Each structure stands twice: as C-alpha cells, then as structure tokens.
Amino acid sequence: MNDIYLDNNATTMVSPEVLEAMLPFFSEQFGNPSSLHSFGNKVGFALKKARQQVQALLGAEHDSEIIFTSCGTESDSTAILSALKAQPERKEIITTVVEHPAVLTLCEYLETEGYTVHKLEVDSKGRLDLDQYASLLSDQVAVVSVMWANNESGTIFPVEQMADMADAAGVMFHTDAVQAVGKLPVNLKESNIHMLSLSGHKLHAPKGIGVLYLKRGTRFRPLLRGGHQERGRRAGTENAAAIVGLGKACELAMQHMEYENTAVKAMRDRLEQGILAAVPYSFPTGDTDNRLPNTASIAFEYIEGEAILLLMNKVGIAASSGSACTSGSLEPSHVMRAMGIPYTAAHGTVRFSFSRYNTMEEVERVIAEVPEIVAKLRKLSPYWDGNGPAENPEQAFAPVYA
Amino acid sequence: MWDYSEKVKEHFYNPKNAGAAENANATGEVGSLSCGDALRLTLKVDPDTEIILDAGFQTFGCGSAIASSSALTEIIKGMTLDQALQVSNQDIADFLDGLPPEKMHCSVMGREALQAAVADYRGEVWSDDHEEGALVCKCFAIDEVMIEDTIRANSLTTVEEVTNYTKAGGGCSACHEGIENILSRVMAESGKEFVAGGVGSAVPAKAPEAPVEAAPKTDIKRISTIMRVLEAVRPRLQADGGDCELMDIDGNTIYVNLTGACMGCQMASMTLGGIQQQLIEELGEFVRLVQVEKKADQLVGIGG
C-alpha cells in the first residue's frame, strides 16, 4: 500500500503537468530571457505567459504587478523591508501573534533595530479583534502584515476588510497568502491589498519559486539590486524553469478551485469527524467555521505530537505537529499557545492537510489507524489512567520544575 | 525528521518496562511540561540490599523521551541505588547509540528522574539544580541558560571567551549571532556594552583577561595541574606521531610546543582548543594556550 501524504501545508508534490511544462527549460530552452537572440527570446515569452497565469489566479489588474522571487520568505522580507525603507519616518509595524516565522522572526529582529511591532492577539478560536486593530492604525505605521490563512489551524483572517481599513488610514497592507492562494478565490484588483506573498511549492509547483504581488502605485524599494530583471524590482537571473512551472500550477489551481472547496473539503470533514468520533479527549483547534478547506488541526490530549507522528509514519501516514519536539524548540507551537490551548493538549496537536491528490480511501485508512496509535501512547502517559485521564491530571502528576 | 539511531527507534516502538512498577516503593517525577517532556519513574527497591528489583516508567514526551525512559529502566534494573546514581545522562545516550543534540535533554530528564526516585526512597528532598533554555549551539548542545550563567559568573565579554568556557560556538560558528545577542543582553544588565570585534572571533584577538572571581591557585599546585593535564593528553598525540610540550607559563598564558602530524593543520587548533578547554576545567580559571615553536620567538595565537 502506498504511503498517505497529509502534510500539504508543509509542501505539495509537483503536479505531473507542471513537471512536464518545466522539463524543456532544463535542456533545450536554456537561454537567458534577457538575451536578444532567439535562445533567450523564447524563454522570455515563456516567462511572460507564466506571469499572466499567475496574474489570472490572483485576479491582479496588471501582469507587471507580479514579481517573481525565490520563495515566500523572500517575498515577505521584501514587502516589509520595502515598506520601512520607502517610509523612513514611520517606525511601527502591525502584525499578529500567529504569523509564520518568515514574518514574526523578521519583526522581532526589527524590534532590536528600533521599530515598534504591534502583534494582534487572537481568541481561543484563533480570531482577531478588529477593534484592537483599528485602534492601532495611525500615520506612524509603515506596514500591516497579516497572513491570509494560518498554516497550522487553517483559520482565515478577514484580510480584505483589514486592507480596506489600512488603506483608509493611509497605511500599506501586506498579506502572507502562501496557504490561501490556490485554495481560496483571490481577486486582488477588487481589493486594497497592496502586497501579497505566495509560494510555489504550496500549490504543486516546485520549491525555490515565490511571488510578491505589488499593487501598481505602491511605493517600493527592492531587496536585491543589480540587473533590470522584474523591472529592476528583483535583480537576479530568472529561475526560468520554476517560473514556467509556477505558471502552469496557477492555471491548474484555477481549474481545481471548485474541487478544492467541495471534494477536498469533504475528505477533510470526513477525516475530522471520523477521528473525533473514535478518539476520546480530542478536539479540533482554530476557527472550524472559517478555515481552509484542506486543513484539520486536532489536539490529542495527554500525549505528545512527535511520538504520534513517529507512530503514524511507521504505518505510512505523514502529517505535522505543533509540539515543541518536532521543531527542536522548547515551546509548543506559538499558534496553539496564542489560542490558550493548555500545554497537555498543545503538545499533542496534529495537523492533517490535504491536496487534490488525496482520496477518500486514504481517509478511511487514517481513521482506522489513528485511534490505536493514540491509545498506545496514552498507555505510557503519566496523565492517563486506564480508560481516561487520571483524576485531576494536573495534580495526579506534578513533576518537579514543570 | 530526526536522525534517530536504530536503538532509539527500537526502544520507542517497543518500550521496555512501560507503566508503573508493581509494589513500587520509590517514585521520581520530573520534567517540563512547557517543553513537552515529563517522566514518572517508579522503582521497587529491596530494603535489605538496596537493589532495584523492578523499574517502570510513564512518559509524556517525544520519541527520544520515551526511548530514554525505556533505556534508563533497562540500565538500572539489578543495580544497587548507589550504583544507579552513578549512571549519567551520557550513559543513557550511549546505551541508545547516541541522541541528536536537540534531544540530549531527554537523557538528562532520565537521570534526574532517577535522582528524584532515590531521594524519595531515602526520604530526602530532591531539588533540581538545572534549568533548561533554548538550544543555542547545536554542535555541542549548549543551551541559552548555561551561556547566560557562564557569562555572568565569569564576566565574559567576547564570543571567543564564551566558546572557551562553554564550547558553545566552537564548531560550525552558525550560532555566533545568537551568542552575541546573549552577550549584549547579559552585559547590559551590569551597564556594559557588548562590542563585536570586526570580522569575527576566528580572527586571533588579543588575549582575554582572566576572570576576577577565580581564586588563583598557588604556583606549585597550579603548575603541577597544568603538567598533569598535558601529560594526560600526550599519549593520544604520540599515537598520532605528535607531542605536546610545556614551554612556559606567563600569568594566564600557557605556551606549549605542539608537534607532529597535527602541526600546521586544522587539527592543530582543534587540539589546542581541546587541551585549553581541559586546562580551564581543571584549573577553574581562564587560561590561554598558545602555540610556540622551539627556538622561534614568533607566537601563534589560536582563535577560540
């Protein structure tokens, strides 16, 4: 039996059609798109087409608003640092406590450089308080950076509304949309989003390619200066094969948007409902009424996530966990902690994330395997006693220096 | 995915002695919930001989925490309590054919659970004396708290000194930014400002000053300690066709003549660094080991 891949928020497989589109650009189509001759010219036309395919998926008004980068992280860094460079008099940034490290770690670094970073808190379902947000918008704020959808819980933020609020206050708005693009309809020409990051490998394109969408008229300062590539906004010879692949992947994502929100969602719902029914003391995290169609985040109480993943891996099921151990840090996922999920559950969160390449048959296999794995680990847990948690688990087991 | 040994996987997939030991008369509970690991160790001890007849564990934790717990119970069964107390976290890690640096704390937790259980049996109160911070140096598994404490205790001011005292940063050097940040923060506590030295600590810097705290040993005792450490490393060097000879001692600078196969290569500084580290540990003070060739007055400093 084939292994089951349910970690599509981490990365996705390259679609066969995408690979096929890319292959010529590793061999006969090797020209530099900047060159005048036909070797380069053909590649140049291929990039132009890819740019339009990305433009179509994003609903951008102009194809020149698409800047190819090396990854989502580069797009995030370019957007935030550009906003600061272009508006040196503004020293504040608004973001959220649940951002991806690509934004959060950069913001924490910028704090040491003298910037003030406001991190919006979330409630127990991972939702933002827009009143708090409104109160922070001012002419001191250089940029707002808020993710479209959370990578761990799948919770969707109202970024279009937040962009309207920022725009009305004269503040630049950036969104890290790497989890949303390809899963949710996006129509940037109708929005006030000034900058948006996407990452190819989250939507069946290869790793090493990203996009920064930059709304026409938004003040910009490049991160990389050099050649005239991307109209001087991102110097460096284009990763032609990956760009062509991303273009194809965007076209396919458009075609599968409905499937993603019906069939993929149905698989996710069946998995979640099946596991929650079979495993006591487990619960979904995040805003289950408003989340990505492909993501389920389930907390298994009294056991630890890495141990769950290792046992699942042994039976051929791949997923992710918010536990400290899977990342090598000492704290469980900042997203789970921000939602106030207790440590005994936060360490045991497992994220199942689907793609259009999963099947309902796989879902049933996972539902059949997971309860046994959880039961096996609970048998080892000092918080567990027979068929349920120990009475007053926090008191029954109170280790020194907890 | 972590790079776990087969032994770790074996003890994780099929843990030995899972669950509480029957008729246990000693219990140790340690761990840190925030970092996701906690362990309850139960022992059945023969009151006459103090031999551990049975051991059981219950662990909330990752694969290596469960494997370390399983390994610990296997190691200590049949030992007397005093023998068991000699088991170090390295013994647990060795039993498992090693643990990734990020996971060494799992073996530390095992040793602490054992100490706590023995204290419980003997009616003593066990208190944990070590606090764990985020891992900074992945080459040598040194955490933030240890670096902070060492900087404070010895008034360290450079990355190079931190490396000399803790080993942190002595490997791939990727954590030097992190160490600089810790230095800035800790030095700021006492109103000092961290000044980074140009390119980095690989460039030979001027000799760091001795820490104020360390009480100097009397000369004779100090010299004999230095000679003893050097004598201890010589057989290993000689086996590789090299040698290490004490040339002179001037304050906290110790001049040696390192010869043989290692001379002039990358290993020379590694060996010097290693010997320097041992000297620092044995002497309890900061010393600087400097390579000097016989009949030559050119001193070659080593960079951290």
Image (spheres, grey):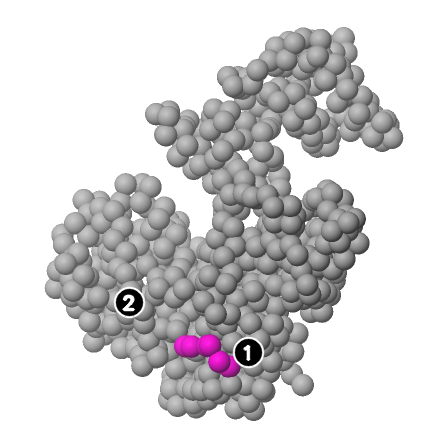
Residue B79 position in % (x across, y down): 78, 50
With respect to residue B142, does A208 lie above or below? below
- Number of marks in picture: 2
Q: Which residue is mark 2?
A: A123
Label 1 marks which chain's residue? A
Alpha carbon separation for disc pair 2 and 1: 32 Å
Residue B148 position in % (x across, y down): 48, 35
Question: Is residue A335 visible from the viewing direction of this image?
Answer: no
Question: Is residue B214 visible from the viewing direction of this image?
Answer: yes
Question: The N terminus of chain A is located in which quarter?
Answer: bottom right
Residue B14 position in % (x across, y down): 71, 69
With respect to residue B278, does A38 lie above or below? below
Mark 2 and mark 1 lie on one chain; the one further toward the N terminus is: 2
Image quarter of residue A63: bottom left
Horizontal side of A138 relative to B33 (left or right) equals left
Q: Which residues are magenta?
A: A279-284
Asked if residue A281 lies in the magenta stretch, the reply is yes
Helix, strand or loop at disc 1? loop
Circle 2 packing at 10 Å, graded few (<14), some (14-19), many (20+), is: few
Have a look at marks 2 and 1 and say if they share a chain. Answer: yes
With respect to residue B274, does A283 lie above or below? below
In the displayed orientation, state which residue is furthest to the front. Answer: B48
Q: Amino acid at mark 2?
A: Asp
Going 77% across and 49% down the picture, which residue do you hit? B48
Going 49% across and 33% down the picture, which residue do you hit? B149
Going 71% across and 8% down the picture, which residue do you hit? B220
Horizontal side of A143 relative to B8 (left or right) equals left
| Of residues A252 and B297, the one drawn nearer to the viewer in this rendering | B297
Q: Amino acid at mark 1?
A: Asn
With respect to residue B221, does A158 lie above or below? below
Q: Which residue is mark 1?
A: A387
